[in-house]
Image (cartoon, helix red, strand yellow):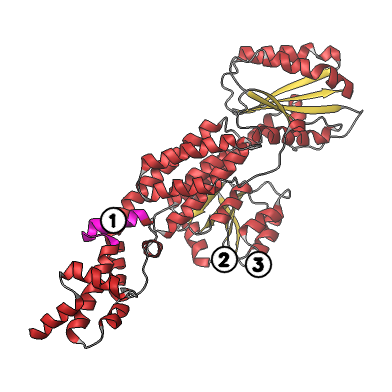
């Protein structure tokens, strides 16, 4: 197994080579490059099995490298990068990278990811060796072979994603019997279990009319055998064997863009709106969830999650994939905000990878909701721990700022932004630490300074009021009297007598 390393920092390349357990992985170094342009040339020439690439490199970054090699190589790609590049992480997931490692690279994690990649490659090669002629159409579907077109034939692909462990050998035989019963009617069906989570039937017919007459009845017969609620999706009919992958991809598109309330039956690509919608009009609900997390109020946060999902169900034209994408990007956004607070975010990104890896197998809205609740609960607890450590420092930072800028117009919201805290949470925390609320603390500082100026200068009361932040002299006199139990003028007279 050959590995190629593309990383612009020589010392990082050297460190990675030391970390890898080459013998244990049965792996050898195919080559290395310090820029994307050279890496692309050598990857095409050396044909490594795995490429470990930095996201950011001079000349051509890692994402451009993978995009440029798409369709030209079967190489598996692993990305490494820094914590801040969440947008790059999203693109890496979309490019089907095997994994995305965050710097500094952990040796155990690196070797584990490489071990997984090696196993994937070995399994894929074993399948190729054991395919046989009976899997000819499946190989066409997977674009492993390009068929020679013969007489005119028509094809369509039926897909059942998700855990299919309930399909027993007996049920499998019943499926085959149904398909066989339609052979003498001019329509064939090949049943394939592509993986544990994916069943595929490739239908073929010599005429389009045969599909029109028999496909619906065949599907009804198959559905009648299924003992559980499940969803099948159907691609469009194509008139060339080489277009079977197109019908297969359409079946996937129909499945992942199905309506939220669709729990069983057969959906057709022909009937689906597959326009991608990454953003839903739910920014207000999203911010309420974030506020609950920041304030450490897990119960309130979960209530806002409930509200968000109720709102989602009211939106028109939203499919399950729209919801998955929305949740995915919302969590990445939250992870970015958390990182600014100095809290580790790698665990959240790992959970995002988990969702992304299963995004096409998500069965229903409840599954997405449970995943989000699990992640947000962890996020809320992490924030509470971090804030417990830092809130004292944050309050001291704010009180120190007030001591120097008491005469300026100060707001709780502005101070909260300065220390990356929610305003309401800062208010309660400030009183807990200082024993007085935010506005009273400012008032005390102003009046202390005013009293000092009255004692030590001959400035007028109105002038002193303005210097400590009060434009209204009457209001200043009133609060001064409330605190000192005498007017500013009386205070000055008493100080003179002393």
Residue 132: image x %, image y %? 73, 27
Q: Secondary structure at mark 1?
A: helix
Which residue bears the numbered disc 2?
Answer: 8
- The image shows residue 396, relative to residue 449, as above or below, that is above
Residue 307: image x %, image y %? 48, 38
* Residue 176 visible somewhere in the drawing: no
Is 5 left or right of 340, judged from the image as shown?
right
Disc assigned to residue 164? none
Residue 270: image x %, image y %? 77, 32
Residue span colored magenta: 424-438
Q: Secondary structure at mark 3?
A: loop
Residue drawn at 40 percent across, 54 percent down:
344
- The image shows residue 8, relative to residue 95, as above or below, that is below
Disc assigned to residue 59? 3
Give the label, 1 or 3, closer to the camera: 1
Give the label, 3 or 2, closer to the camera: 3
Give the label, 1 or 2, closer to the camera: 1
Which residue bears the numbered disc 1?
Answer: 429
Whole-angstrom CA distance, mark 3 to mark 2, is: 10 Å
Is 380 left or right of 391, judged from the image as shown?
right
Residue drawn at 26 percent across, 68 percent down:
443
Query: Residue extending furthest right?
Result: 151
Image quadrant in which the C terminus is located = bottom left
- The image shows residue 426, relative to residue 360, as above or below, that is below
């Amino acid at each position: 197994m050959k590995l190629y390393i593309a990383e612009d920092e020589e010392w990082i390349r050297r460190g990675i080579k030391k970390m890898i357990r080459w013998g244990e992985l049965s792996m050898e170094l195919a080559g290395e490059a310090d820029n994307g342009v050279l890496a692309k040339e050598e990857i095409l020439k050396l044909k490594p099995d795995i490429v470990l690439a930095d996201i950011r490199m001079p000349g051509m970054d890692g994402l451009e490298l993978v995009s440029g090699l798409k369709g030209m190589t079967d190489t598996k790609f692993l990305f490494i990068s820094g914590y801040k590049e969440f947008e790059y992480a999203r693109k890496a997931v979309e490019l089907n990278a095997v994994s995305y490692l965050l710097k500094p690279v952990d040796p155990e994690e690196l070797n584990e990811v490489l071990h997984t990649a090696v196993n994937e490659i070995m399994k894929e090669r074993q399948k190729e060796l054991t395919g046989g002629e009976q899997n000819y159409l499946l190989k066409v579907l997977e674009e492993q072979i390009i068929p020679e077109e013969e007489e005119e034939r028509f094809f369509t692909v039926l897909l059942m994603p998700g855990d299919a462990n309930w399909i027993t050998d007996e049920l499998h035989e019943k499926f085959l019997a149904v398909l066989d019963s339609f052979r003498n009617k001019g329509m064939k069906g090949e049943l394939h279990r592509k993986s544990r989570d994916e069943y595929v039937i490739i239908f073929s017919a010599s005429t389009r009319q045969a599909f029109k007459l028999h496909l619906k009845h065949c599907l009804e017969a198959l559905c009648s055998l299924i003992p559980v609620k499940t969803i099948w999706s159907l691609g469009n009919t194509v008139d060339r064997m080489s277009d079977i992958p197109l019908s297969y991809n359409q079946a996937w598109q129909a499945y992942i863009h199905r309506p939220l309330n669709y729990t069983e039956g057969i959906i057709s690509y022909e009937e689906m709106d597959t326009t991608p919608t990454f953003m839903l009009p739910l920014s207000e609900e999203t911010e309420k969830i974030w506020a609950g997390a920041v304030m450490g109020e897990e119960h309130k946060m979960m209530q806002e999650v409930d509200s968000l999902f109720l709102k989602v169900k009211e939106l028109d034209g939203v499919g399950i994939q729209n919801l998955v994408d929305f949740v995915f990007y919302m969590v990445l956004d939250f992870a970015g905000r958390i990182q600014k607070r100095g809290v580790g975010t790698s665990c959240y990104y790992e959970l995002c990878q988990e969702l992304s890896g299963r995004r096409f197998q998500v069965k229903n809205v409840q599954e997405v909701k449970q995943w989000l609740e699990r992640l947000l609960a962890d996020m809320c607890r992490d924030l509470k721990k971090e804030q417990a450590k830092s809130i004292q420092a944050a309050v001291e930072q704010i009180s120190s700022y007030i001591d120097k800028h008491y005469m300026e117009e100060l707001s709780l919201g502005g101070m909260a932004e300065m220390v990356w805290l929610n305003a309401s949470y800062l208010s309660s925390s400030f009183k807990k630490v200082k024993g007085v609320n935010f506005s009273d603390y400012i008032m005390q500082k102003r009046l202390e300074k005013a009293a000092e100026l009255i004692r030590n200068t001959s400035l007028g009361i109105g002038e002193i009021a303005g210097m400590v932040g009060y434009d209204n002299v009457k209001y200043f006199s009133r609060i001064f009297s409330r605190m000192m139990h005498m007017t500013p003028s009386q205070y000055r007279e008493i100080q003179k007598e002393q």
